[in-house]
Amino acid sequence: MNPRFLAPILLLGSNIFMTFAWYGHLKFKSVPLKWAILASWGIALFEYCLQVPANRMGSDVYSAPQLKGMQEIITLLVFAVFSIWFLGQPLKWNHWAGFAMIIVAGWLIFLE
């Protein structure tokens, strides 16, 4: 598959894993912190198995700043769905407005 398309797909997958690693434990606050940390590290391993190849392959067609900008936008989109669906915490207008500004910043990164 073309790295131009494969990199964003892998970044999407890696961000799903990382969002669960970073924020999934918030739904299970009764679990001792040390177990939450270990579970998060275990989930993050899968994130790295997708993130590293995404950046390695993606660097053939995107610059490092473009890859980072793409990753941040994907992270926001994944987090928005995660916050609403998994955590039951809907986003407010100011969250959406802030995310929109970051998306505009990501768009600027791709201008040449």
Image (cartoon, rainbow, N blue to C red):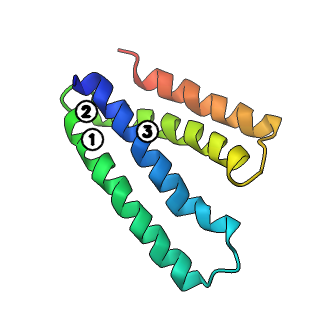
Q: Is residue 87 above or below residue 107?
A: below
Q: Residue furthest top?
A: 112
Q: Is residue 106 left or right of residue 33?
A: left
User: Which of the 4 quarters of the picture holds residue 109?
Assistant: top left
Residue 58, labelled with which disc? 2
Looking at the image, which is closer to me, 57 or 107? 57
Given contact means CB atoms under 8 Å apart, are the residues at marks 1 and 2 in contact? yes
Quarter of the image with the N terminus is top left
Q: Is residue 48 left or right of residue 29?
A: left
Type of the residue with mark 1: Asn
The amino acid marked with disc number 3 is: Leu
Whether 109 is drawn above or below 90: the answer is above
Q: Position of residue 23 (x, y in %)?
A: 60, 60
- Dot 3 alpha-carbon crowd within 10 angstroms: few under 14, some 14 to 19, many 20 or more: many
Quarter of the figure with residue 100: top right
Q: Position of residue 8 (x, y in %)?
A: 37, 31
Nearer to us of marks 2 and 3 is 3
Residue 77, placed above or below residue 52: above
Q: Secondary structure at mark 3?
A: helix
The percent position of residue 107, horizontal first and vertical second, equals: 49, 22
Instruction: Describe the element under mark 2 as helix, strand or loop.
Output: helix
Image point (56%, 28%), residue name = 103
Total count of labels = 3
Q: Report, in whole angstroms, how far the alpha carbon at label 1 lies from the one at label 3.
A: 12 Å
**Res. 12 mark:** 3
Q: Is residue 93 left or right of residue 49?
A: right
Q: Residues within 10 Å of mark 1 (few under 14, many from 20)?
A: many
Q: Nearer the viewer, residue 29 or 73?
A: 29
Q: Quadrant of residue 10?
A: top left
Q: Which residue is mark 1?
A: 55
* Mark-to-mark CA distance, 1 and 2: 5 Å
Q: Judge the density around disc 2: few (<14), some (14-19), many (≥20) Cα neighbours within 10 Å.
A: many
